[in-house]
Structures are given as structure tokens and as C-alpha cells.
Amino acid sequence: MKIILIGFMGVGKTSVGKQLARKLNFNFIDTDYEIERLTNKSIPDIFEQYGENYFRKLENSILEKFVKNEDIVMATGGGIITTKENYNILKNEEKVIFLDGSVETIINHVQNERNQRPLLKESENLSKKIEELLSIRYEKYIEVSDILIDINGKNIDEVISQILVYIG
Ligand SMILES: Nc1ncnc2c1ncn2[C@@H]1O[C@H](COP(=O)(O)OP(=O)(O)OP(=O)(O)O)[C@@H](O)[C@H]1O
Ligand SMILES: O=C(O)C1=C[C@@H](O)[C@@H](O)[C@H](O)C1
Ligand SMILES: [Mg+2]
């Protein structure tokens, strides 16, 4: 089985994915972490030195490579659905789970971690920036996912329980 978590920055793909993989005894793959490991650079440094397009190319090669594996939980980067190549790969997968959170929830989760997220780092109005990006991306998250889990008001364990119910 291959479980792929998608959704906006801060919804908990990494945190939920890591613990879920441990529970299922699956390997955990985080596309952001794999990109950092491959380049030996942090995500903010990659964005700063090479730009977002270059990051998206790396993200695509990592997704192509790891999506071939079985018995994995994969946490993706929040913007993975923005390129056609990745969109098409994810659309063909069977257990793509969209972790959906409100702007308010996302702000609560990311406000102290903005430096790790180049797209949010410098915006003066965090809420407006999240709304803008979400409005561009939301439809795509819906289209490629097989199930939506509303994470608002849920802790990480509760989100994991819902995923376990879904996968049966
Ligand atoms: N359900 C939750 N309740 C409370 N805090 C949460 C929840 N899910 C995640 N968090 C916290 O929110 C922060 C962001 O979570 P995480 O890094 O897992 O998000 P992400 O979806 O992987 O983001 P990104 O797309 O940027 O990689 C972390 O500090 C994490 O502990
Ligand atoms: O939403 C996004 O575009 C991003 C989310 C993070 O997971 C990282 O992949 C990077 O900061 C870009
Ligand atoms: Mg993450």
C-alpha cells in the first residue's frame, strides 16, 4: 500500500505522515526532506539560490522516483500539485489523502516556522498570502485526492485515526 499525503503548508503532512508510517511499519518519505538530502541544502537556500522552478524540477524527480515504492507513507510538499507532471502522477495514485485546514488553522501551525517556508517568509500579510495561494491550489488538491480529511480542531492522533479508518 502507498499512502500519499497532500495539502497546504502546515496542515501536518510531515508530522502525521511520520507517525502514521511508524504505526503501519511502512517507510516514511518526505519529498521536502529528500530534496534537502539530495542537494545538501535547506529548502529556503534552494529557493534563494536557484529559484522556485528549479525546486519544482527536483520535487518532480523525487516524486517520480519514490512513487514507485510500495508500503510507504509519503508526505509531499505543499506546492507539489502546482506542476502538471506531478499533478498527473498523483491523479493516477489510489490513496492520495488531502489534509484540509482553514486559513486560521494553517496560520496557527506555521506562524512560528515561517523561516522554513520561503513562500510565506517575507509576506507582510500572512493571512492574505495563504488565502491567495490556497485559492490557486484548492481545486487541484481536490482533483487529485481520493479523500479529504478536515484537520480543523483535530490533533495529530485524531487525524491519524481518521486515516486508519479510511484505509481500513
Ligand atoms: N493536527 C495538528 N494539531 C496541532 N499542531 C499540528 C497539527 N498538525 C501539524 N501541527 C504542527 O504544525 C506545524 C506544521 O506541521 P508540518 O510540518 O507537519 O506540516 P506540513 O504539512 O508538512 O507542512 P509543509 O507543506 O510546509 O511541509 C508543526 O509544528 C506541527 O507540529
Ligand atoms: O507550498 C509550497 O509551495 C511549499 C511547501 C513546502 O512543503 C516546501 O515544499 C516549500 O517550502 C514549498
Ligand atoms: Mg512537510
Image (cartoon, rainbow, N blue to C red):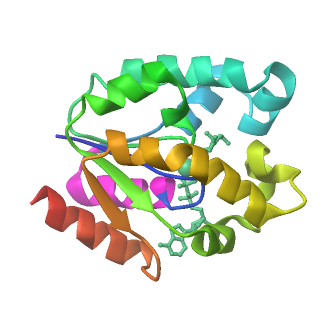
Residue located 54% across and 41% down the image: 77
Residue 104 is one of the magenta-drawn residues: no
State the extent of the magenta-drawn residues as a range. 13-26
Q: Is residue 120 above or below residue 48?
A: below
Quarter holding residue 53: top right
From the top left corner, tell me how far across and down residue 143 is, in percent. Answer: 34, 42
> Which sits in the foreground, 25 or 149?
149
Question: Is residue 113 visible from the viewing direction of this image?
Answer: no
Q: Is residue 160 visible?
A: yes
Residue at coordinates 27% horizontally, 22% vertically from top-left? 68
The quadrant the N terminus occupies is top left
On screen, residue 15 versus residue 95, left or right, reads right
Q: Is residue 17 magenta?
A: yes
> x%, y% of residue 105?
58, 74
* Quadrant containing ligand 2: top right
Figure check: 152 above or below 30: below
At horizontal 48% and vertical 51% (from top left) the residue drawn is 7
Q: Pick whichever, 90 or 44, lies toward us.
A: 90
Q: Is residue 120 left or right of residue 98?
A: right
Quarter that holds the C terminus: bottom left
Residue 49 picture quarter: top right
Q: Position of residue 132 (x, y in %)?
A: 69, 52
- Answer above or below: position of 56 versus 151: above
| Residue at (83, 51) in percent of width and height | 121
x, y percentage for residue 84? 47, 22
